[in-house]
Amino acid sequence: MTVPQLQTSPGQSSAIATGTRVASADVLRGMVMVLMAIDHVRVYSGVPAGGPTAGVFFTRWVTHFCAPGFAFLAGSGVFLYAQKHSGVSKFLATRGLWLVLLELTVVRVAWTFNFHFLDYDLAGVLWMLGWCMVMMAALVKLPIKVVGAVGLAIICLHNLMDHAMPGIVKSLETNPYAALWKFLYVGFWAGPVQMGAHGPTVYVLYSLIPWIGVMAAGYAFGSVFALTPERRRQVCMMVGLVAIAAFVLLRATHFYGDPRPWQGWQTVHGMPPLLAFLNTTKYPASLCFLLMTLGPAILAIPLFESGSSAFAKVMMVYGRVPFFFYLLHIPLIHALALIVSKIRFGYVDPWLFTNHPMGNPQPPDGYVWSLPLLYLVWAIAVFLLFFACRWYAAVKARHKDGRLRYL
């Protein structure tokens, strides 16, 4: 994350003033990308997205930090970018639409390795980030306190819809505005969106609410990166601890913040109490889900302030080129899954060419990987991506071509 050159003030970080990078933001973003890759290897492994056993549950759960962290830090990046550049709204709108286009084309083919666009398309994380950037193009014209208030209001209040959700989902079957509702809030729980009589079927993985709130809150939080390290540490600790405490209180009482009581998961699905407690709703992301993930992420920011440890330096390589990492990691993981299938069975299973990650059928009998194999493939993918990301980070450092901002 390149930090803009601002005039130094008593409470302002010298790193901000000199235009150097905020190491903690790069490290945290790199960790988000690396964790994300675990879940995307899981997609091709046939391992379910969570379950009653600790190994399967936490394989999925650790990746819950990715989307909130990515959206939040994207908002902070918008704030820092706006301090140095003009024409921010135009850039956000064009880059956002670019992300949406790539989601529906390049990324969709990378997920599936097929070209059956009329059968299946995916509104995934790039779709969400892209449309949120388009909306941020308007929000950045408002005072930062207003943007922050709007973001927090969306994050905190959207679960007021919980009691109305069953009726809303049912009404979407006949509602002419069903597609808009599915894109904005209820997501794939209300089923896919049919884009016209002869258009593709779009699966909405990430609805825009509450994610625009997360990005707007991250935008307001961007000002924290302009503080001195000591003051930044204090703010991060306060915000992180308050968020974690709020999560524990709301989740324990089930007063508000998640439509699914954790006691129900413990009883009906046989989950141990801790796993049921942590099993919050991601689609659409509940308040408890966001408190559970953003709280620890914000609390961790001061831990990587210097970026001097070996671990931090590796994570910074990924964190400086997150979009480049994203575009490469899905086809790489998919290709590695083909190789694993060839080694295990002597042939490439046709299941790997179905509509991953949401429209694919159940894996064939005997296909599901063990967890050690899943993590081995993940480690290989992350290792290979290190060299590509290091190369591209060096290219971006040498060339200040504005077109590279889109990658």
Image (cartoon, rainbow, N blue to C red):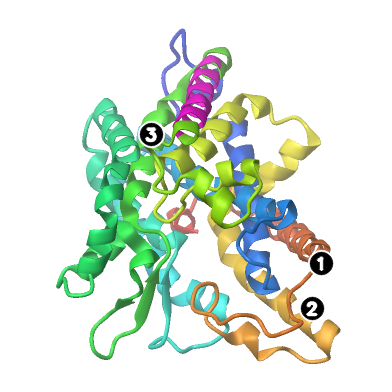
Q: CA distance from mark 3 to mark 1?
A: 41 Å
Q: Which mark is residue 255?
A: 3
Q: Viewer-nearest of labels 3 and 2?
A: 3
Q: What is the three-letter code of the residue carrying label 3?
A: Phe
Extreme residue in the front direction? 267
Tell me the SS state at disc 3. loop
N-term mark: 1 or 2:
2
Q: CA distance from mark 3 to mark 2?
A: 46 Å
Q: What is the three-letter code of the residue carrying label 2?
A: Val
Q: CA distance from mark 1 to mark 2?
A: 9 Å
Q: Residue 307 in the image: x percent, y percent?
A: 69, 31
Q: Main SS type for the magenta part?
A: helix
Q: Is residue 228 above or below residue 44?
A: above
Q: Is residue 248 magenta?
A: yes
Q: Is residue 258 above or below residue 108?
A: above
Which segment did they paint magenta?
234-250
